[in-house]
Image: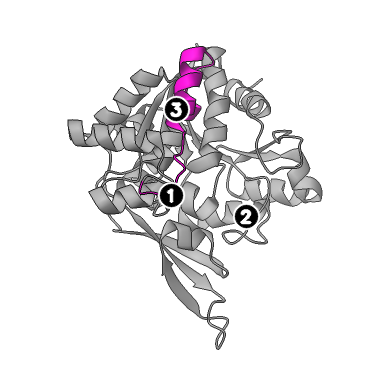
Amino acid sequence: MSASDRAQSVVAFGGGHGLSASLHALRLLVADLVIDDLTAVVTIADNGGSSGRLRDEFGVLPPGDLRMALAALCGDHQWGDTWARVLQHRFAGHGEMNGHVIGNLLIVGLWEQLGDPVAALDWVGRLLGTTGRVLPMALTPLDIAAHVRGLDTADPAATTTIRGQVEVATTAGEIVSIALEPSDPEPCPETLAAVGAADWVVLGPGSWFTSVMPHLMVPQLRDALVRTDARVVVVLNLVDEAGETDGFGPIDHLAALVEHAPDLRIHTVLADLESVGDDAGDLHAAVASYGAALHLADVAVHDGSSHHDPQRLAAAYTAIMTGR
């Protein structure tokens, strides 16, 4: 039986809304029996909002992106839908609870009860009835450091180092490269095992420098991704992102990823047909130069936004993973 004839194992990497869209799509492939095992691996460098406050107070991993991934994997039934909405509920008011999210508090509470971040996330998944598992990319709270060009008015070519996911995502300069602090965080054994057992690995979409590429900066995780027999699919963003990737086209997104992980073997690059537009020929050439195949498809929501449509994205994933 070939890989295209059986249900397959998929590990999806990212964070925030980009990973959420991908997981909504991949969840549909589980229902269609294209996938039988789905794991989300989530960036853990958030330092803002409710996540940042909980991280600072309790010294824990920031729970926000983990919560969003769990909510995205909830089933299309009353139980899952209700708990997903509860998990995402953000408190209003003017006191200390303002801005905190129920799911963040639940995750941190279970971390304190169980003393094991992975076990706690698994328990939240059972409560929600999730289709798949959510894991952190490492077990050490991380900060993103970026070398940024254009912030020094006296020398526009000089680079400045800025730290923090929020600060990097909103910088007015041009990001040249990123790194993690600490540079060699404790890996998550379950994440490494999932990569080793995967048939497919999906990178993106999402905030390129703060949600997608940080996974490639964790040394043992990067080694696992380089060694895995899984086929790697890179999903490009529909547009550039203010602050983080201003002026980036599809080729720029891909080039930045390859520059940070030149030994990563990419199987397929998935891009939106309309977003690529007249650059399709150049993108084909760039993708081919990395030894990969380009899959162009209509994967955007047709509402004027810059979001991926889960149904269209699911169709593209199915075509890639089944060869049909």
CB-based contact (under 8 Å), mark 1 and mark 3: no
Mark 1 surroundings within 10 Å by alpha-carbon count, few (fewer than 14), some (14 through 19), many (20 or more): few
The span picked out in magenta is 71-96
Measured Cα–Cα span from mark 1 to mark 3: 20 Å
Q: Amino acid at mark 1?
A: His
Q: Please, what secondary structure does the residue beneath circle 1 have? A: loop
CB-based contact (under 8 Å), mark 3 and mark 2: no
Using the image, determine if residue 87 lies above or below residue 305: above
In the rendered structure, the answer to whether residue 186 lies left or right of residue 287 reads left
Disc assigned to residue 211: none
Q: Quick one: which residue is furthest to the bottom in this view? A: 154
Q: Which residue is mark 2?
A: 241
Q: Which residue is mark 3?
A: 86
Viewer-nearest of labels 1 and 2? 1
Residue in view at x 27 percent, y 43 percent: 139
Using the image, determine if residue 162 lies above or below residue 300: below
- Give x and y (percent) for residue 292: 59, 41
Is tag 1's residue or tag 3's residue first in the polypeptide sequence? 3
Q: Amino acid at mark 2?
A: Glu
The quadrant in which residue 178 appears is bottom left
Residue in view at x 44 percent, y 40 percent: 91
- Give x and y (percent) for residue 106: 32, 32
Based on the picture, tell me whether residue 91 belongs to the magenta stretch: yes
Mark 3 surroundings within 10 Å by alpha-carbon count, few (fewer than 14), some (14 through 19), many (20 or more): some
Q: Which residue is mark 1?
A: 94
309 vs 39, nearest the viewer: 309
221 vs 58, nearest the viewer: 58
Q: Quick one: which residue is furthest to the right in this view? A: 278
